Image (cartoon, rainbow, N blue to C red):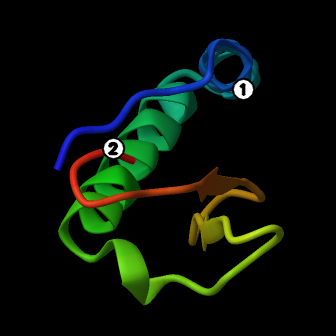
Amino acid sequence: MNYTFHPEAASDLFDVMEYYEALREGLGLRFHAQVSSTLNNICLFPDSYPTFESGSKRAILHQFPFALVYRHNDSMI
């Protein structure tokens, strides 16, 4: 399944990654890796995450206080 980010969400992700990298070298990369892993899980099992608001779903990252909120149809997240 393919995915795309809302432009503001993509900007937020980049900003958060830069923030963590500024806190400690390599932490931004760990954040990116966890986002990528979570996106992979969402693509494989989009219905496995709880409903959040207005039919969207929310996947909470395990090691960071961050969540990916998404909607999906048969072919796109």
Which residue shows up at 58% across the image and 64% down it? 61
Q: Position of residue 28 (x, y in %)?
A: 54, 27
Q: Earlier in the sequence, mark 1 or mark 2?
A: 1
Report the residue at 44% width, 34% height from top: 32
Q: Quadrant of residue 62?
A: bottom right
CA gap, disc 1 to disc 2? 14 Å
Give the x, y percent position of residue 66: 72, 54
Label ID, residue 73: none
Q: Above or below — where is 67 with respect to 7?
A: below
Front-most of residues 10 and 16: 10
Around disc 2, counting alpha carbons within 10 Å, would you say few (fewer than 14), some (14 to 19), or many (20 or more)?
Answer: few
**42 to the left or right of 18:** left
Q: Does residue 44 appear to the left or right of 19 in the view shown?
A: left
Picture quarter containing residue 19?
top right
Circle 2 SS class: helix
Where on the picture, by quarter, is residue 53?
bottom right
Q: Position of residue 26 (x, y in %)?
A: 47, 27
Mark 1 lies on a secondary structure that is helix
**Circle 1 Cα neighbour tier, 10 Å, few/some/many (<14 / 14–19 / ≥20):** some
Residue picked out by circle 2: 36
- In the image, what residue type sits under mark 2? Ser
Q: Nearer the viewer, residue 8 or 77?
A: 77
Q: What residue sits right under mark 1 in the picture? A: 16
Left or right relative to 36: residue 25: right
| Marker count (numbered) | 2
Q: Residue at x 39, y 59 (%)?
A: 38
**Residue found at x 39% / y 47%:** 77
Q: Residue furthest right?
A: 53
Q: Are marks 1 and 2 in contact (CB under 8 Å)?
A: no
The amino acid type, in three-letter code, at marker 1 is Val
